[in-house]
Amino acid sequence: MGIDRNLYLGPYAKTTTEVVSKEEDRCGHLPLDTQEKFCSECGTRISDRIYRHKGDAVSFYPEEAWKNPDALSSTSWVGPPEIYKKGEKEYRDYLWLPNASRPGKPKRKGVSNVDKHDEVVIDIQNVDIEAEIEWFKTAYPELQKLEEAFGNLTVGWGFIQWFS
Ligand SMILES: [Zn+2]
């Protein structure tokens, strides 16, 4: 087992969700004010029945929203992104990159496999960033579904590193 470093340069989308406290009842068979110590149905210890954890306010599953769930790749398939605070609230940003090959996709040899090369030079002086962003928005209608689900979406262009 190893950790792969992934590198990307180009247009990307970012969606943000608030992270909220969630409670789950692991039993559900007995009333909450039961005097029992264990549930006779599922065996759950009543003092442990409520599971409190932090979770995303918006949960998005591409396989349910898109015909082709691989249309965009996320940098967080392996694990959720880090939580950050803004004011009193906590958030997570999800990054989405073009994945399915669609006409006009910018080709940058070496960017996705930089660790396999000793040295890579990517000259970006003549890259038409605005055109690549426009291409991304047009070629991936899935972005609209993301925006609907999260209630926000920004498109940017840049260098992204993540681990998988
Ligand atoms: Zn139970």
Image (tube, rainbow, N blue to C red):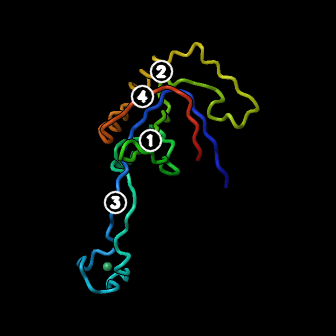
Secondary structure beneath dot 2 equals: helix
How far is mark 4 from mark 3, CA to CA? 30 Å
Q: CA distance from mark 3 to mark 1?
A: 20 Å
The residue under the point 30% across, 86% down is: 36
Badge 3 or badge 2: first in the primary sequence? 3
Question: Of the residues under marks 2 and 1, which one precedes in the sequence?
Answer: 1
Q: Circle 1 sits on which residue? A: 94
Tag 4: amino acid: Val
Q: Ligand 1 shows up in which quadrant of the image?
A: bottom left
> Which amino acid, mark 2?
Glu
- The picture quadrant where one finds residue 66 is top left
Of discs 3 and 2, which sits in the foreground? 3
Q: What residue is shown at x 33% (from left), y 35% (from top)?
A: 152
Which residue is denoted by mark 4 in the rendering?
A: 155
Q: On the image, numbered disc 3 is attached to which residue? A: 22
Q: CA distance from mark 4 to mark 2?
A: 11 Å
